[in-house]
Image (tube, rainbow, N blue to C red):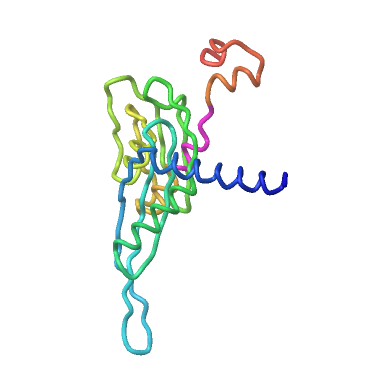
Amino acid sequence: MARQKNRNNRGRRRQRQRAAEEQQQWIERLVSVKRVAKVVQGGRRFSFSAVVVVGDGNGLVGSGVGKAREVADAIAKATENAKKNLIRVPIRRGTIPHPVIGRQDAARVLLKPASPGTGVIAGSGARAVLECAGITDVLCKALGSTNPYNLVAATVNALEQLEDPLEVAQRRGVPLQKVFEG
């Protein structure tokens, strides 16, 4: 009897989590759609590849890639993939806490904090990631490849490397002011 209750509770919990996820407002940005061809015996078989960035505008962001025979299906797959790969980003007064370089294959992305009112100064792939994360002021420079797949992945990699100053201060056992002043 107790086992049956536990199973029912787990099922209800999952339903509540799904309902909460559906209610959450996601910002979705389509970065790139490409038509790709596979050469087969009868000729070419075309499909579509899409890169999508998803975020809540409050420090949660993820990116995904999807491939399908139809554009809409490719975008839907990429969106689902992005929701599975979410990361939390520390944001302080609308910008990032410190400069960082993200890498993915031949693409590198340099992110620098900016003063309030600067805006998001970035290319299309990096801009989509930063805006979906909720960052309002940042300077970004793409170094190396500007392939949208790798640029988005390098930007997400840079955001993964960011450390919250409060956590750093607690880990080191020093006041927050000393973390900023060195």
Image quadrant where one finds the C terminus: top right
- Residue most toward the right? 2
Q: Is the magenta stretch mostly helix, strand or loop?
A: helix
What x and y, as percent, mark residue 99? 45, 29
Is 13 placed left or right of 38 in the picture? Answer: right
Is 164 placed left or right of 144 in the picture? Answer: right
- As rendered, which of 144 and 51 lies closer to the eye? 51
What x and y, as percent, mark residue 179? 56, 16
> Range of the magenta residues?
156-163
- As rendered, which of 20 and 34 lies closer to the eye? 20
Is residue 162 on the magenta stretch?
Answer: yes
Is residue 12 on the magenta stretch?
Answer: no
Write down the quadrant of residue 14 in the picture: top right
Note whether 167 is above or below 24 in the view shown: above
- For the point 61% across and 42% down, which residue is it? 9
- As rendered, which of 87 and 121 lies closer to the eye? 87
What x and y, as percent, mark residue 39? 36, 81
What x and y, as percent, mark residue 78? 39, 56
- Residue most toward the front? 1
- For the point 49% across and 39% down, which residue is it? 87
Note whether 153 is above or below 113 in the view shown: below
